[in-house]
Amino acid sequence: MRRLIFLMVILVTISSCSKSENNSGVPEKPIILTSIIPLKDIVLNITGTDFEVEALIPAGSSHETYEPEVQVVKKMAKAKALILTGTDLLFEKTISGWDKSPDIRTITLEKGIEIFEHNPHIWLGIEEVKKMSMNLAESLSSLFPEKANDFMKRQKAFAEKLDSAEIIVSENLYLLKEQYIVTYHPAWKYLLSRYGIREISIESHGKEPNAGEMLKTISRIRESGVKKIFVEPQFDNSVVNTIRNELKIDIVMVNPLPENIIANFIEVSKKFATAK
C-alpha cells in the first residue's frame, strides 16, 4: 500500500510539470501506453510511426507478477491514451487504481469478444486480435479524428495479414483436432479452441497444483499420449520439471507475450504441431 501511495504522489507531481515539447523545442509525438507488449504490437500496426508507443510491462516480464517501477508511472503523466485488454488481467486491475492524468484516455479492446471462463488472454486468438484491432482503430479515430482514415486503412491491412497467417496456422494445427495440448499456464484456449484442440493446463487460476492435483494431472497427461509440455519463459517451471521427469517427456518454450503477434502465431502453431 505504501508503495502504491508513493507511486501515485509521483504521478501527480510529474503530471503538473509535464510539457508537450522536448528540449529542442520540437513538438513530441503523442504517447500511447499499453498494459502489455502484445498490445503495443497491435497499436503500432494501427498507428504507424505517428505516435510514441510503449508498454508498461517490459518484454520478458509476466503480467501475473510484474510490479511497476517509478519510471513506469512517469509515463502515465504524459500519455494521451492507455490501451488495456479490458479483461481480468491483474496488472490492469492495478492500473485502474492509479490516479491518472486527466488528459489520458483509457481504451479497452474486449468489445465483441466472448471471454472464456474469465480467461484474459484474448490477444492469443487470431479472430480476437482482429476484433481488438478494429476496436482500437475506432477508439483512436474518435480521439484523433484527423488521423481516422489512416487508422482504418492500417487496420484493414493488419486484418489481411492476420488472415494470411491463419491459413498457415490452420495447416499446422488441423491434424490435432480433438486431441490434447499440455501447457503450464492456461493461456492458449483462444487459439486452440478455434481448431478443436483441447488444453490440459498444469496451473489453474494462477496457482500451482497441490499433491493430489499433481497426481491427477500426471494421469491425464499419460492418458492423452502427448510427448511435450509447452511452457512460458515468464514462469518458474519447477513443477513442469517434476512432471517431465515422471513421464519422460520434453519441454518446449512458447511465448504468450510476443513482441510480434503474427510471427508468434505461426511459430507457436509449428511447435504445437509436434505435440504428438
Image (cartoon, grey):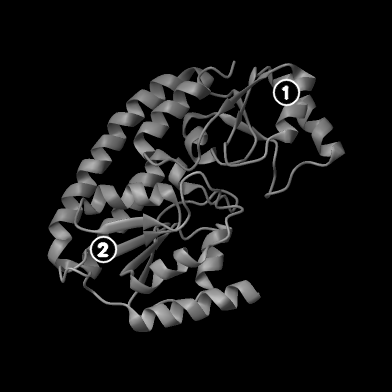
For the point 64% across and 76% down, the residue is 2
Find residue 248 and report its image quarter: top right
Q: How many marks?
A: 2
On the question of residue 27 being in view, the answer is yes
Cα gap from disc 1 to disc 2, whole angstroms: 46 Å
Asked if the residue under mark 2 is in contact with the one under mark 1, i.e. CB atoms within 8 Å, the reply is no
Q: Disc 1 designates what residue?
A: 244
Mark 2 sits on what residue? Answer: 140
Is residue 247 left or right of 59 when viewed as pictured? right
Q: Could you tell me residue 69's position as x and y percent?
A: 52, 63
Q: Position of residue 187 (x, y in %)?
A: 56, 41
Secondary element type, mark 1:
helix
Query: Which quarter shows the N terminus?
Result: bottom right
**Foreground pick, 259 / 17:** 17
Which amino acid lies under the numbered mark 2 shown in the image of this protein? Leu
Q: Which of the 4 image quadrants contains residue 77?
A: bottom left
Q: Identify the residue at image location x=59%, y=15%.
A: 276
> Label 1 neighbourhood size at 10 Å, few (<14), some (14-19), many (20+)?
some
**SS at mark 2 in the image:** helix
In this picture, residue 212 sits left or right of residue 195: right
Q: State which tag comes first along the sequence, 1 or 2.
A: 2
* Image spot of residue 19 (x, y percent): 27, 77
Residue at (33% x, 26% y) in the render = 167
Left or right: where 131 falls relative to 240: left
Label 2 Cα crowd, 10 Å radius (few <14 / some 14-19 / many 20+): many
Q: Residue furthest front?
A: 23
In this rendering, the answer to whether 118 lies above or below 140 is above
**55 vs 249, nearest the viewer:** 55
* Residue 173 visible in the current orientation: no
Under mark 1, the amino acid is Arg
Q: Tell me which residue sits at (26%, 35%) in the image.
A: 161
> Mark 1 against mark 2, which lies toward the viewer?
1
